[in-house]
Image (cartoon, rainbow, N blue to C red):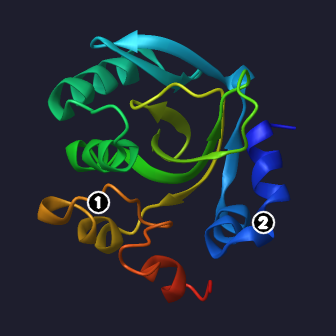
């Protein structure tokens, strides 16, 4: 089992965020991911990314200039650059670290192929947020650095609106 999936399953009852991600998320395992350098950044991509898609990713990285340790903002900027990048939030795991899942955000290209421009993890488990109204609320001058699902600054509004308390 994907260690990120295992983490989400085992921690499901620890918080409304964990429960939501468990209910609505999906996993991506190490064997389906490659770590590559694009536009000078180390990124994680689904093995299935085509050359044409890699060119789109490279242009997006150059245009959005992702910052280290700003995964939520980076993923939202990728979505703003091109809505083929769907915002995904959940947990990621490095195989060589003895640590549970780390709260993280990344993109999926067309809702299917992992694109992480912040940090190349080995395993992922997250929920796609595709509602443009929700995404717009957390971008622009209010660009979040705290995520959408796990955003404690807005008192977990996203989760509460969906009945997760």
Residue 142 screen position, x and y as percent: 19, 65
**Residue at point 54% right, 35% down?**
113
Q: Position of residue 24 (x, y in %)?
A: 66, 65
Q: Image check: 74 left or right of 32?
A: left
- Which numbered marker is on residue 58? none
User: In the image, what residue occupies the spot 46% across and 78% down?
Assistant: 158
Q: Is residue 53 above or below residue 159?
A: above
Compared to 155, does 11 lie above or below? above
Q: Secondary structure at mark 2?
A: helix
Residue to which mark 1 is pinned? 144
Residue with the mark numbered 2: 12
| Closer-to-camera residue (98/149) | 98
Residue count near mark 2 (Cα–Cα under 10 Å), binned few <14, some 14–19, many ≥20: some
Q: Nearer the viewer, residue 68 or 36?
A: 68
Residue 109 seen in this snapshot: no
Q: Residue 115: x, y in percent?
A: 46, 32
On the question of residue 96 being in view, the answer is yes
**Residue 110: image x %, image y %?**
45, 43
Which residue is painted at 42% across and 52% down in the image?
87
Residue 150 appears left or right of 62: right
């Amino acid at each position: 089992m994907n260690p990120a999936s295992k983490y989400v399953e085992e921690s499901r009852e620890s918080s409304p965020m964990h429960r939501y991600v468990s209910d609505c998320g999906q996993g991506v395992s190490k064997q389906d991911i490659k770590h590559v350098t694009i536009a000078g950044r180390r990124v994680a991509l689904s093995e299935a990314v085509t050359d044409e898609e890699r060119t789109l990713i490279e242009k997006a990285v150059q245009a959005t200039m992702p910052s280290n340790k700003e995964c939520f903002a980076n993923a939202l900027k990728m979505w703003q650059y091109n809505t083929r990048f769907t915002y995904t939030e959940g947990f990621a795991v490095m195989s060589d670290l003895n640590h549970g899942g780390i709260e993280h955000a990344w993109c999926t290209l067309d809702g299917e192929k992992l694109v992480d421009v912040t940090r190349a993890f080995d395993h992922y488990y997250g929920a796609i947020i595709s509602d443009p109204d929700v995404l717009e609320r957390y971008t622009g001058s209010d660009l979040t650095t705290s995520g959408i699902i796990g955003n404690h600054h807005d008192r977990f509004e996203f989760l509460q609106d969906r009945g997760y308390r």
